[in-house]
Image (spheres, helix red, strand yellow):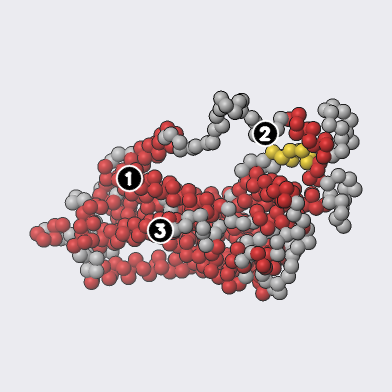
């Protein structure tokens, strides 16, 4: 065989390998897009907590990266590559055996590298002239990068040492060569499964040895069992109070769970597609799409219905004319429209962006209200308060939460924030100023309240609103997926 034809065979085998373990590849790509291109994901590395709570929080994050993302990525790729080995001719087998041995480790390493990328780009969020609190966030980022690089080194060492140790134990001790694993191997790979191996000799397919499987196939059976156990564990965590996530698991630890929770189910569909030679994964996606669009009451809305006794329906929203009259009255202008008014209305438009948009929208609105408070020492307007001049707010997604919190704060007429030390448990101190109050980075506890309304809004919108929603979403989708499977 010439070198050019050998190169084409290797390239063909490599591309086919990526296609075979496409679920793992897509999971790694999703993580890269999340941490590389999403500022909200990068910002989770700024959660500042007291040292004893930070250890639990970031320990849970790295444990979730390993258990619910890296390990499923590696195991899924291993199972699919082993299952596809019988499709190759002998000319492919040597290079493909190398891919079976190493490609799953490479893909799992890509998960850790994406975390490093997100931590690197998080530095862009820190201003050029950092404050004392910004410096604490800066130091935390460097610490997290150091921990992630240490995890990369440990994974590389495991990649070098573990396969040889496991192969030797499997071959010499026959640890996995028991009836249960052989039964599962027959179910996974079938009676016609290839017996090609790497680093060890294939079993003699004669007599009693005819139905024996290679150590690598038995290891893949073990990988399938572990992958199933991880899936059951993730379901258990989501089933167990999905709307009451522990603070240690909030925000950052939820990211790898969300990215990796799909792997076991999608691996099963992809494996079934490979065995049956049918596009089952594509059919399943099409089926879920049809069901989601045609199931009645899947997106239920409360609809007002006209009652013959109560008369015509009454609109819950005021008309534009009514709103303008109320605004003019609040600002001391004649209620008659088109009459002269010395005060100009303010209309705010804010874009979406999950918790980040809520924080910035609420902070800006409350800060403008603080700066224009007539009784405040820092008043810069000398005229009407911002909230009185404000006529309308146009928001979407996360910014709607920030606007709603600001409106509720004004409706409540609250002028003093809740002291975080008394009313907020330290494990929930996601807010920078709450972290200061609890003494992050060995600092003495201090009261951070300087700008009342801004602090009130920030104290609310920095709560973890996304983790319970994502957990409940995973629960709903995985339950539907399981029922369809």
Other-residue count near label 3 (Cα within 10 Å), few / some / many at <14 / 14–19 / ≥20: few
Q: Which residue is mark 1?
A: 485
Residue 11 visible (yes or no): no
Q: Secondary structure at mark 2?
A: loop
Q: Which residue is mark 2?
A: 317
Please tell me which residue is depicted at 74% across the width and 49% down the height of the picture.
410
Closer to the observer: label 1 or label 2?
2
Q: CA separation, marks 3 and 2?
A: 43 Å
Closer to the observer: label 3 or label 1?
3
Query: Is 199 or 74 nearer to us in this picture?
Result: 74
Q: Choose top left, top right, bottom left or bottom right for residue 332.
A: top right
Closer to the observer: label 3 or label 2?
2
Q: Choose top left, top right, bottom left or bottom right for residue 282.
A: top left
Residue 62 percent location from the top left of the image:
50, 64
Label for residue 168? none
In the displayed structure image, the side of residue 77 where residue 371 appears, left or right: right
Q: Which residue is mark 3?
A: 236
Among the two numbered marks 3 and 1 on one chain, the one whose residue lies closer to the N terminus: 3
Q: CA separation, marks 1 and 2?
A: 45 Å
User: Is the Cβ of the residue at disc 3 closer than 8 Å to that at disc 1?
Assistant: no
């Amino acid at each position: 065989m010439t070198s050019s034809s050998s190169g084409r065979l290797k390239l063909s085998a490599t591309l086919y390998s990526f296609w075979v373990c496409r679920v793992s590849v897509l999971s790694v790509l999703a993580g890269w897009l999340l941490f590389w291109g999403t500022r909200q994901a990068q910002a989770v590395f700024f959660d500042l907590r007291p040292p004893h709570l930070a250890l639990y929080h970031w320990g849970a994050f790295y444990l979730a990266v390993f258990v619910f993302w890296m390990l499923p990525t590696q195991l899924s790729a291993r199972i699919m590559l082993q299952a596809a080995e019988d499709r190759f001719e002998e000319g492919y087998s040597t290079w493909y055996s190398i891919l079976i041995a190493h490609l799953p480790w490479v893909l799992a390493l890509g998960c850790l590298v994406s975390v490093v990328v997100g931590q690197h780009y998080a530095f862009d969020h820190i201003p050029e002239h950092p404050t004392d609190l910004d410096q604490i966030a800066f130091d935390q980022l460097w610490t997290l990068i150091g921990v992630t690089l240490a995890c990369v080194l440990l994974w590389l060492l495991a990649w070098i040492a573990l396969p040889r140790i496991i192969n030797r134990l499997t071959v010499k001790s026959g640890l996995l060569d028991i009836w249960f694993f052989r039964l599962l191997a027959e179910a996974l790979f079938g009676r016609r499964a290839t017996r090609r191996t790497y680093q060890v000799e294939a079993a003699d397919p004669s007599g009693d040895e005819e139905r024996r499987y290679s150590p690598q196939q038995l290891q893949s059976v073990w990988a399938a069992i572990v992958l199933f156990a991880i899936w059951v564990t993730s379901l258990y965590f989501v089933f167990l109070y999905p709307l009451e996530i522990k603070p240690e698991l909030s925000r950052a630890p939820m990211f790898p769970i969300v990215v990796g929770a799909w792997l076991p189910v999608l691996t099963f569909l992809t494996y079934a597609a490979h065995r049956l030679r049918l596009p089952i994964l594509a059919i399943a996606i099409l089926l879920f799409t049809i069901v989601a669009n045609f199931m009645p009451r899947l997106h239920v809305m409360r609809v007002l219905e006209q009652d013959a006794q109560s008369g015509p329906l009454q609109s819950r929203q005021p008309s534009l004319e009514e709103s303008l009259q109320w605004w003019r009255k609040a600002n001391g202008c004649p209620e008659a429209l088109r009459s002269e008014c010395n005060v100009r209305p303010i209309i705010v438009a804010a874009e979406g962006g999950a918790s980040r948009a809520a924080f910035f929208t609420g902070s800006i609105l409350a800060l403008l209200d603080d700066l224009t408070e007539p009784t405040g020492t820092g008043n810069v307007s000398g005229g009407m308060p911002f909230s009185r001049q404000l006529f309308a707010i146009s928001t979407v997604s996360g910014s709607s939460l920030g606007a709603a919190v600001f409106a509720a704060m004004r409706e409540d007429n609250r002028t003093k924030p809740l002291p975080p030390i008394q009313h907020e448990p330290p494990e929930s101190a996601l807010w920078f100023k709450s972290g200061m109050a609890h003494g992050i980075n060995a600092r003495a506890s201090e009261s951070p309240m300087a700008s009342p309304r801004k602090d009130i809004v920030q104290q609310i919108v920095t709560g973890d609103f996304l983790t319970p929603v994502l957990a409940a979403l995973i629960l709903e989708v995985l339950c539907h997926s399981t029922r369809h499977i």
